Image (cartoon, helix red, strand yellow):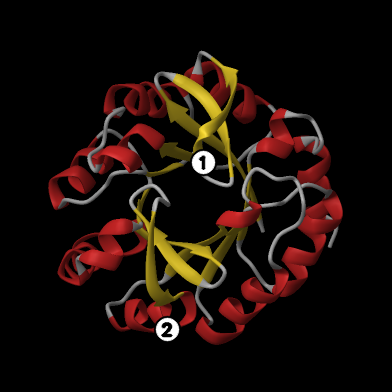
Amino acid sequence: MEIIPAIDIRNGNCVRLYQGDYGIETIFSDDPVEMAMKWQSLGALRLHIIDLDGAASGGLCNLQLITEITNAVLIPVQVGGGIRQMRTIEELLKVGVDRVILGTAAVENAELVKEACYRFGPSIIVSLDAREGYLATHGWKQETELKAIEFVCSMIKLKVRRFIYTDISRDGTLTEPNFNAIFELVDTTRCSVVASGGISSLTHLKVLKKLGVNGAIIGKALYTEQINLKQALNAVSEI
């Protein structure tokens, strides 16, 4: 199971939001590139970058900063936030991004997902951002009537093979992941699932690995040092 540090970019800073609320923001660094290099130096084998400005506006806003990160680190990077057109996917892959995350676009444009999977296959991830089991879009600001599990089944038909599951109500709260929802997703899909939201202890990581997830995205717990990255990497490698 991969341990994946999160770097959320807003207004040029590395930030964390509370439950996806843009009004409750904590700035942890004014240099996302430096932060990316820090996580790499501590042993991270992949980075998770979200363009929060892009997620809110509907179009990628931080391509230059993302490019600087991909040029600075030697480990693979996955990027999401405001990616709603094929040309944006192409731009990101061209500058060295390893995997591209589709959230709102996956909900609203099945044809884009189908074409992206046909052209780029393993480089495409669909993000399932759920609040009480229902997906939210547009930077988590708009609710939908789509249940996460049902939506996943429709995405699998389009050849999506990687998913990120985020429980919005737990994101940035340092509580615990939604283990029940994550297990249901893993058990139903048999696809690659990465868990996100509420991960705040080594115990959480151990449980997630036993549930069969392929990765765990950690944000606030790393920045507040509630989880030590090196210890986390060692903990999951021992299971």
How many numbered markers are drawn? 2
In the rendered image, the quadrant that contains the N terminus is bottom right
- Three-letter amino acid code of the residue under disc 2: Glu
Do labels 2 and 1 touch, CB within 8 Å?
A: no
In the rendered image, the vertical position of residue 168 relative to residue 113, given as above or below: above
* Pick the front one: 24 or 222: 24
- Three-letter amino acid code of the residue under disc 1: Asp
Residue 91 location, quadrant: top left
- Mark 2, Cα crowd under 10 Å, few <14 / some 14-19 / many 20+, is few
Seen at 61% across and 84% down, the residue is 187
- Mark 1, Cα crowd under 10 Å, few <14 / some 14-19 / many 20+, is some
User: Between disc 2 and disc 1, whose residue precedes?
Assistant: 1
**Gap in Å between the C-alphas at discs 2 and 1?**
26 Å
Whether residue 126 appears in this view of the structure is no
Q: Position of residue 155 (x, y in %)?
A: 34, 76
Q: Position of residue 19 (x, y in %)?
A: 58, 47
Taking the image as shown, residue 163 lies to the left or right of residue 45, namely left
- Name the residue beneath numbered marker 1: 21
Residue at disc 2, secondary structure: helix
**Mark 2 or mark 1: which is in front?**
1
Q: Position of residue 224 (x, y in %)?
A: 75, 29
Seen at 35% across and 22% down, the residue is 65
In the rendered image, the vertical position of residue 60 relative to residue 101, given as above or below: above
In the rendered image, the quadrant that contains the C terminus is bottom right
Residue at disc 1, secondary structure: strand
Seen at 35% across and 43% down, the residue is 81
Residue 158 location, quadrant: bottom left
- In the displayed orientation, state which residue is furthest to the top: 30
Seen at 15% across and 70% down, the residue is 111
Whether residue 177 appears in this view of the structure is yes
- Name the residue beneath numbered marker 2: 150
Taking the image as shown, residue 208 lies to the left or right of residue 51, namely right
